[in-house]
Image (cartoon, helix red, strand yellow):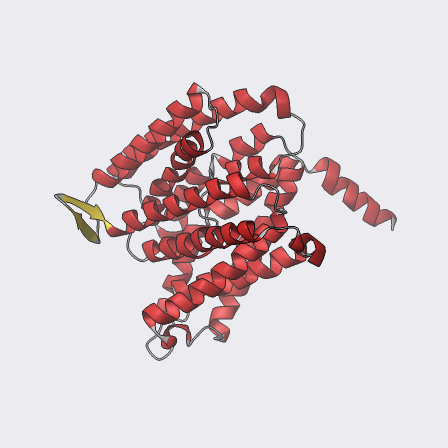
Amino acid sequence: MASQRLWHHFVKNIIPGQAYLWLAVLIFGSSSAVTRKLTEIGSQNLIDGRNPISLCNVLFVGNISALIVLTLIYGRQCKKQTLKQISPKNWLILTVVAIFSGALAPGLIFQALELTEVNNIILVSRLEPPLILALSCWVLKEQVNIWEVMGAMAAFVGVILTIFLQTPVAIMNVGSLNLGLGEFLTAMASLAVAVSTILNKQYLSHVPIGIYNIFRTTLGTVIFFFSAMVLYGREHFLDVFSPFLWKWMLFYGFVIVVLGQSCWIKGLRNSSVSVASLVGSFAPIVGILAAYSILGETPTLAQYTGGSVILIGIFISQFGIWQHHHKATLNSVISATAQQKIETKIGFKGI
């Protein structure tokens, strides 16, 4: 018992909250590269000509892993009395949010992973924070400071530079423009997440975060499964119970889902808004380094140019967030709304 108390004291007081946040960001930032690497491993170990670690299988099984973790963490919130307090209108909005952020957005990201480089996905997904900021001002009438606006504009310019300064592999024609299909799908995923974030902030702020996450993940997984069945056929999930797939997905689920989410939640509970927001800002840098070290993707001139402008925008926005929260929330508990705002800096988290 004494040794157990000493261990809890060490974890609580010696290991700072920032350490958990940094570990979580390292994990989440690497998730795109890890996901692509797993599909490459699967392509080298085909089963009857099929890749057992297809992106659809990774998303489906990864969501199941995430649902198990969320249930263990938040299951106590799903009481009958609490569920009854959510109005039919809010259930409808929660369903729309689940479709957008739990099925559509991750489905588009996983499809984009088949069509373009991981670095492009990391950089183009930085559209999400500017879109959320613009929609917050337009729909929610939120007040933002000039630093956040300047940062959002810089990030948007950086994304545009990333898209148009390179020759895409998979091309789609939009009028006289040739856009990369993978980059376009990533942008659509960012828009879907931005819209769901605004709906959540406007209508679902009082819904317990556990119920929100469990419902979104459950419905999103079900919708994705049946959508893939319709689009690709039943044979697309023939290998979903393959031991080879589950061997790697247990690793994926433990590292990306369990360890990543646990460290993120633990870090948020022991950090200020400013610190958590700053750490989250480094996710794109981690993602690019992970793509280089895991996949050997060397950033192109377009990615260097656009990425540099995006990073400038991120840190300008971070200064505005620090200025806004420093006095009021330096030592306060991070609210659900603040947590969601911080998570937009991270982007795709592998689930």
Would residue 76 be seen by someone viewing this image from the given angle?
A: no
Q: Is 244 situated above or below 300? A: below
**Residue at screen point 33% across, 33% down:** 156
Which residue lies at the image location 41% right of the left edge and 71% below the top edge? 52
Q: Report the front residue among 324 and 242.
A: 324
Q: Is residue 80 left or right of residue 256?
A: right
Q: Position of residue 216 (x, y in %)?
A: 53, 55
Residue located farthest toward the left when viewing the structure as drawn: 176
Residue at image x 58%, y 51%? 212
The location of residue 295, given as percent across then percent down, is 37, 52
Provide residue 273's location: percent of width, then percent of height. Answer: 59, 30
Q: Whole-percent x and y of residue 148?
A: 43, 25
Residue 86 visible? The answer is yes
Outermost residue on the front side: it is: 88
155 up-or-down from 56: above or below = above
Judging depth in this view, the residue of 20 and 187 nearest the camera is 187
Is 22 left or right of 82, judged from the image as shown?
left
Quick check: 193 above or below 254? above
Q: Nearer the viewer, residue 273 or 34?
A: 273
Q: Is 331 displayed left or right of 212 in the figure?
A: right
Q: Please give the name of the residue rendered at 43% of the width and 75% of the height, measured from the top-left corner.
A: 239
Q: Is residue 193 left or right of residue 250?
A: left
